[in-house]
Amino acid sequence: MKLPSLVSVNWLAQAILKAKPWKSLSVIHSAMGSKKDFIESHIPSAVYFNIDECCDMASAYPHMLPSEKRFAEYLQHLGTIS
């Protein structure tokens, strides 16, 4: 099944209600907020994803995704994949 890249709030709410076997990530970096902000206002079942911790530190550009291996390791650390 192909999932859309961008979904509406209504689509996400329906998917959560159906208990689909997937996780949503709430991506946050230090300029946007904190883990406290996430705890107070996150989407139910969303996982806190700190882009400051999981980015390509060698890139000249901020918050670029790391290698596939590093990304997978970070997701495993969060418990989103096994």
Image (cartoon, grey):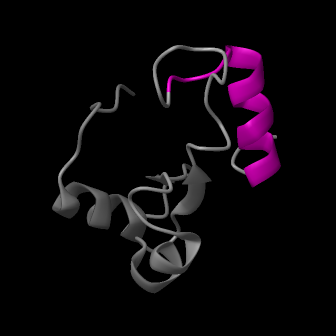
* Residue at position x 51%, y 14% in the image: 60
* Residue at position x 20%, y 61% in the image: 9
Tell me the quarter of the picture where residue 72 sits: top right
Residue 15 percent coordinates (x, y): 35, 58
Tell me the quarter of the picture where residue 51 sits: top right
Q: In terms of depth relative to the viewer, which is nearer, 19 or 68?
A: 68
Q: Residue pushed farthest bottom?
A: 40
Secondary structure mostly seen in the magenta stretch = helix
**What range of the chain is rendered magenta?**
64-78
Q: In terms of depth relative to the viewer, which is nearer, 58 or 27?
A: 58
Q: Residue pushed farthest front?
A: 60
Q: Quadrant of the C terminus?
A: top right
Is residue 33 placed above or below 63 in the rendered structure? below
* Residue at position x 38%, y 59% in the image: 32
Residue 65 percent coordinates (x, y): 55, 23
Residue 54 percent coordinates (x, y): 65, 37
Is residue 71 placed above or below 31 in the rendered structure? above
Does 32 appear in magenta? no
Q: In terms of depth relative to the viewer, which is nearer, 77 or 12?
A: 77
Does 73 appear in magenta? yes
